[in-house]
């Protein structure tokens, strides 16, 4: 036989690894095979032409669709191939696509045959070798999925397909977010779901601004955090690609290079490197911009953006082998973190369901989700959700509660956590606090049959405590104890569980204390302001609950030590409230710091706290509809240098 076949990757020891995948059909897990191999023509007298290549009996010669790819192997020479997905254009400019990755309708395999048929001057000849297989396990895996449900609204999920193009990224994943728009699953926020692409902006996508968390422990190998992002789909007005060379013309100021991965992070994890790509400019924490910085599994890494070579907002994750030596100053090659060879990645504790099996939210019952166990995403487009149990989708779930936000000038990293049920919120809070985030504002509201909690976090480390106490008298006593121990009461909310109303306090370390005062209505807080001011305390936060018809219901004010002259603004409708509050803030010496509202006749009443502002940087105030709308506008405001300081739900 004139040919020899040598397989080189992905090799671990004496065997070659494959990727176990979640099921593309409920209950039917799969495996995916992609190999790099060399075919050598050992003849010294004649050339041969490849007539077919088969892996496990499946033809894998799609790359010959490329007009530039010849089937010829010259005498005494060799060619290297990989069965992967790819694409090009024909002479007429028409797209040509192929996908030679072999899928097995089973989750395990011990061997597979690779057969190559060639023809020289005589009859066709076939050479077959048997590849010994081993299931791949990542060095620090299985991984934790980098997206969390804590930042998703009702009937939202991450989704991906295990079908990435190019050989060196054959096992990579491009991950987006989708949600029910009322008639279909859609990556855009509901109010933008029908926008044509030409009118879309990056913030219209549900995934934009979502935080990413480390899949495994490791150290930073390379990081880019300042490459400009795309803004809209009208690429003509913001050219970032040279029309001739196709190279990015927008570059990272730090490195002077336009990276296809945009703002991205490489983490060295054991004998592998993990890539997180297409992030928001400025969203990677400062401490992770240093090569060698420690990274812990579950640690915040950055926000999903729209940077680099990408058609729309999403995040990209990939795994490669680590080279024996890793330079620390080779920016042109990402310190060679991208120079290794392709490897599968697998997850555990992540639930998945093919989207095609969920025609609507009611078509995704918990029993049909699969919990991945050392597996990657399915080949077919599928929901992905990391957690103890699969998401609870239902057409009856709504996102209708109006949100009002206050944004202050800042460049701090901020995140919003929304969870149904206090226990679920506390779990998310504990993860965030352990990751150097501080809860600065907390709002509770009733939606979808129970209490929902929305927390605003800033990335700054502070001693903190979140209390849940009942009844009111015990909450007051508990607050006094915590203040005596050196904590400040910064915010308060409450929720009803059965017949018990629980009071929740947000505390941070500080000298200014905090006294909670309850009165029968918001109007009566003015009297409390006068009384507390005599003791050197000012109103810094408030909360109202269980309103009676036309009244605010009981109101809670938090008073802390301060020399500020707080003003309480109360008006009978939003327009009057906004005008009155802004009249006090026209010179930027004051700003609004909290809002409450209650149903009244003929319109809703609003109250707000206006306090002196030493920064004189101003504010943004706005009502932005549902949580989905609120999330979108928060990202729009963030691009202008504004960070969410307080949120109110009506």
Image (tube, rainbow, N blue to C red):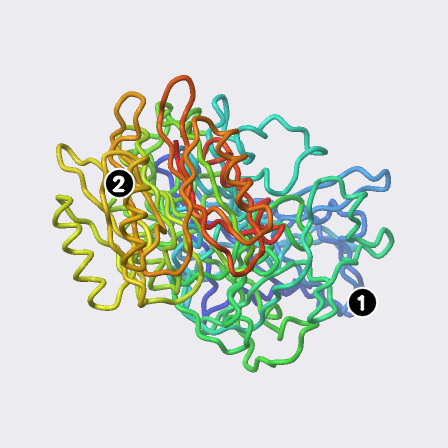
In depth, the one of 382 and 618 nearer the eye is 618
Residue 9 shows in the view: yes
Q: Is residue 624 above or below residue 160?
A: above
Tell me what residue is drawn at x 55 percent, y 46 percent. 585
In depth, the one of 6 and 482 nearer the eye is 482
In the picture provided, is 125 more to the left or to the right than 497? right
Q: Residue furthest top?
A: 602
Q: Position of residue 312 (x, y in %)?
A: 64, 44
- CA–CA distance between discs 2 and 1? 76 Å
Q: Position of residue 227 (x, y in %)?
A: 67, 61
Q: Look at the numbered disc 1 and give the secondary structure of its residue.
A: loop
Q: Is residue 227 above or below residue 584?
A: below
Quarter occupied by the N terminus? bottom right
Tell me what residue is drawn at x 64 percent, y 59 percent. 261
Residue 30 shows in the view: no
Tell me what residue is drawn at x 31 percent, y 57 percent. 537
In the picture provided, is 229 more to the left or to the right than 628? right
Q: Is residue 597 above or below residue 116?
A: above
Q: Position of residue 549 (x, y in %)?
A: 28, 21
Quarter occupied by the C terminus? top left
Q: Residues within 10 Å of mark 2 (few under 14, many from 20)?
A: some
Q: Position of residue 140 (x, y in %)?
A: 39, 67
| Residue annotated with mark 2 | 421
Q: Look at the numbered disc 2 and give the secondary structure of its residue.
A: loop
| Residue annotated with mark 1 | 45
Q: Earlier in the sequence, mark 2 or mark 1?
A: 1
Residue 526 occupies which quadrant of the picture? top left
**Mark 2–mark 1 CB contact (< 8 Å):** no
């Amino acid at each position: 036989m004139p040919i020899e076949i040598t397989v080189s990757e992905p090799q671990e020891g004496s065997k070659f690894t494959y990727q176990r995948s979640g099921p593309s059909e409920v209950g039917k897990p799969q495996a995916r095979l992609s190999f790099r191999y060399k075919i050598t023509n050992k003849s010294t007298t004649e050339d041969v032409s490849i007539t077919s290549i088969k892996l496990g009996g499946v033809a894998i010669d799609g790359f010959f669709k490329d007009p530039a790819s010849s089937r010829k192997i010259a005498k005494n020479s060799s060619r290297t191939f990989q069965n992967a997905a790819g694409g090009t254009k024909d002479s007429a400019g028409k797209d040509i696509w192929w996908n030679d990755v072999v899928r097995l309708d089973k989750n395990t395999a011990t061997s597979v045959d690779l057969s190559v048929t060639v023809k020289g001057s005589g009859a066709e000849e076939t050479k077959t070798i048997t590849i010994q297989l081993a299931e791949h396990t990542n060095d620090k895996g299985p991984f934790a999925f980098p997206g969390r449900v804590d930042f998703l609204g009702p009937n939202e999920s991450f989704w991906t397909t295990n079908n990435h193009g190019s050989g060196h990224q054959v096992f990579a994943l491009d991950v987006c977010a989708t949600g029910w728009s009322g008639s279909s699953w859609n990556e855009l926020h509901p109010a933008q779901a029908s926008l044509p692409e030409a009118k879309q902006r990056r913030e219209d996508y549900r995934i934009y601004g979502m935080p990413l968390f480390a899949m495994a422990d490791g150290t930073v190998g390379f990081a880019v955090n300042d490459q400009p992002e795309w803004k809209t789909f009208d690429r003509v007005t913001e050219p970032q690609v040279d029309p001739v060379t196709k190279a990015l013309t927008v570059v990272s100021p730090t490195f002077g290079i336009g990276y296809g991965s945009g703002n991205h992070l490489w983490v060295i994890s054991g004998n592998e490197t993990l890539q997180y790509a297409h992030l928001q400019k400025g969203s990677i924490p400062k401490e992770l911009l240093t090569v060698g910085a420690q990274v812990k599994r579950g640690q915040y890494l950055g926000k999903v953006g729209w940077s680099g070579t990408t058609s729309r907002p999403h995040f990209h994750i990939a795994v490669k082998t680590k080279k024996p030596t890793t330079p620390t100053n080779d920016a042109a090659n990402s310190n060679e973190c991208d120079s290794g060879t392709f490897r599968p990645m697998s997850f555990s504790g992540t639930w998945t369901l093919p989207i095609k099996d969920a025609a609507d939210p009611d078509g995704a019952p918990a029993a049909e989700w699969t919990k991945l166990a050392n597996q990657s995403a399915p080949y077919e487009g599928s929901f992905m959700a990391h957690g103890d149990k699969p998401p609870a989708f239902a057409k009856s779930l709504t996102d209708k509660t109006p949100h009002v936000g206050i944004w202050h000038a800042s460049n701090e990293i901020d995140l919003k956590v929304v969870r149904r049920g206090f226990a679920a919120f506390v779990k998310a809070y504990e993860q965030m606090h352990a990751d150097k985030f501080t809860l600065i504002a907390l709002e509770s509201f009733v939606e979808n049959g129970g209490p929902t909690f929305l927390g605003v976090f800033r990335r700054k480390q502070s001693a903190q405590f979140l209390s849940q106490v009942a009844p009111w008298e015990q909450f007051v006593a508990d607050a006094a104890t915590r203040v005596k121990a050196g904590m400040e009461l910064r915010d308060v909310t409450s929720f009803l569980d059965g017949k018990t109303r629980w009071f929740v306090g947000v505390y941070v370390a500080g000298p200014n204390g905090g006294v909670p005062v309850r009165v029968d209505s918001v109007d009566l807080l003015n009297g409390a302001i006068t009384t507390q001011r005599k003791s050197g305390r000012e109103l810094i936060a408030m909360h109202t609950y269980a309103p009676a018809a036309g009244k605010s219901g009981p109101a809670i004010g938090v008073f802390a030590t301060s020399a500020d002259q707080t003003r309480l603004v109360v008006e009978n409708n939003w327009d009057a409230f906004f005008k009155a509050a802004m009249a006090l803030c026209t010179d930027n010496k004051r700003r609004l710091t909290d809002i409450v509202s209650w149903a009244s006749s003929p319109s809703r009443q609003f109250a707000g706290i206006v306090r002196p502002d030493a920064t004189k940087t101003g504010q943004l105030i706005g009502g932005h509809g549902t949580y989905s709308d609120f999330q979108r506008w928060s990202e729009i405001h963030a691009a202008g240098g504004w960070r969410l300081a307080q949120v109110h739900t009506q």
